[in-house]
Image (cartoon, helix red, strand yellow):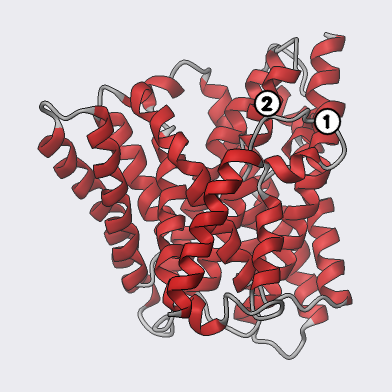
Amino acid sequence: MKAIFAFFLLVLIAFLGSQFLFKRKKLFLPLSYFFLSGLIYVFLGLSLGKNGLNVLSSAVLEGLKPLISLGLGWVGFIFGFQLEYRYLRRFPQKYVELSLLQSLFVISLVVGAFGWLLRSLFPSEPSAILYGMAVALGLLLSLNSPSLLNFASSDISQKGNYFHLARFLVSVSGFWGIGGLALVASFWHFPFFEGNIFTRGLVLLLCSTIFPVFIAYAFHFLTIKKTSESDLLVYLLGLAFFASGTAAYFNLPSLYVCMVLGITYSNLTRIQEKLYPLILYTEKPFYIIFLILIGALWELNLDYKIALLAVILLILRTVGYSIPLRPFGKILRFSFPLPTLFGLCFLSSGGIAIAFIVSLKLIYPFPLIDVFVSVALIATILGELLSPWALKSSIIKLDTEK
């Protein structure tokens, strides 16, 4: 009964929130993006969880856990659905290469720094766990969110090369990070990762990839004739939920499975441009419920170690996206310079990062995973709070000065 009450409370909050709190506001006002990005719902969930009012208690959350898996799947599907080849090929190949180089540099930087930091702060923990956490944090930092640029687009009067490049990079960067999540989840799969790691990992990775491709093709051929767009939207919801539920059952990342599903179907259908706005319209209420549940799951236990790691992670995000830009621009022969200042526009990681964090928490039930969640969420929230200022100091200034 309590779970039913909690579910209806979530639906009510989602309805009210999508009607009011996501309305357009002046982006660069203090704390404006805090509401626009939905971060307030994480704190609302924290207050409703067992550390607050206990409306979303551990027992209730256990009953609502399928909703979290469905939320992860829908986030992954929406992200993958935008990666249509016909759209991506409009951009120069060097944009894709820059995205990959950025991600690899950031991942390497974080793994190198946190591999040492975590062993120093948690000497009693197994090295495999600590290095796995360092890799996960590196993959997390490789993710960027397009939400900030979407919100800011109406406030940016001059949209030059820097805006369009940043818009492309934040739209595709998640592919590398979520792909890395699939590798980690497959080759270090809980609970049987101790023997035959390569063989089992390869099988799990192939299954995670082939399964969504197969059902996307089957769905496309079953609905290709005389299916209205509104009907397709309902069917797509069911398809994404089926894929995410199957992935959760086998303890595989719903985020990756549904991303592959979204990529495959978006490149099969001829009405991607008509469906995408309809899909985005459904995102807000699902996203609100998802963020509230994430907040309720958050085992916040703030100490100096977590605070220190979160701040260092945010610094590494700024450094990792800023320092290598000039040499990368020269290597790839960009027609316009890529100054250090341009890297400031990549502080926002948004909902895709939160989905990544929760995916790891669901897959790996280790005691240290709550430390990872706290460090990652705090760094993400700090990045979201600073990102409007950083955007104003980077793209807007650069395109104005051009």
| Furthest residue toward bottom | 124
Q: Is residue 81 left or right of residue 377?
A: left
Q: In which quadrant of the rendered image does the C terminus lie?
A: top right
Q: Residue at x 23, y 36 (%)?
A: 231
Q: Is residue 52 visible?
A: yes
In the picture shown, does residue 225 fall above or below 287? Answer: above
Q: Which residue is mark 2?
A: 331
Asked if the residue at tag 1 contacts the one at tag 2, i.e. Cβ–Cβ closer than 8 Å, the answer is no
Location of residue 337 (image quadrant): top right
Question: Which numbered disc, 2 or 1, marks the residue closer to the eye?
Answer: 1
At numbered mark 2, what does the secondary structure look like: helix, strand or loop?
helix
Q: Residue at x 78, y 71 (%)?
A: 116
Q: Is residue 306 left or right of residue 234?
A: right
Mark 1 burial class by Cα count in 10 Å: few <14, some 14-19, many 20+: some
Q: Give the amino acid type for the residue marked by disc 2 in the picture.
A: Ile
User: Between 191 and 359, which is closer to the camera in this rendering?
Assistant: 359
Q: In which quadrant of the rendered image does the N terminus lie?
A: bottom left
At numbered mark 1, what does the secondary structure look like: helix, strand or loop?
loop
The label shown at residue 312 is none
| x and y, in percent, of residue 113 in the image | 78, 62
Q: Which residue is mark 1?
A: 28
Q: Residue at x 26, y 28 (%)?
A: 229
In the picture shown, does residue 266 fall above or below 246? Answer: above
Q: Give the amino acid type for the residue marked by disc 1 in the picture.
A: Phe
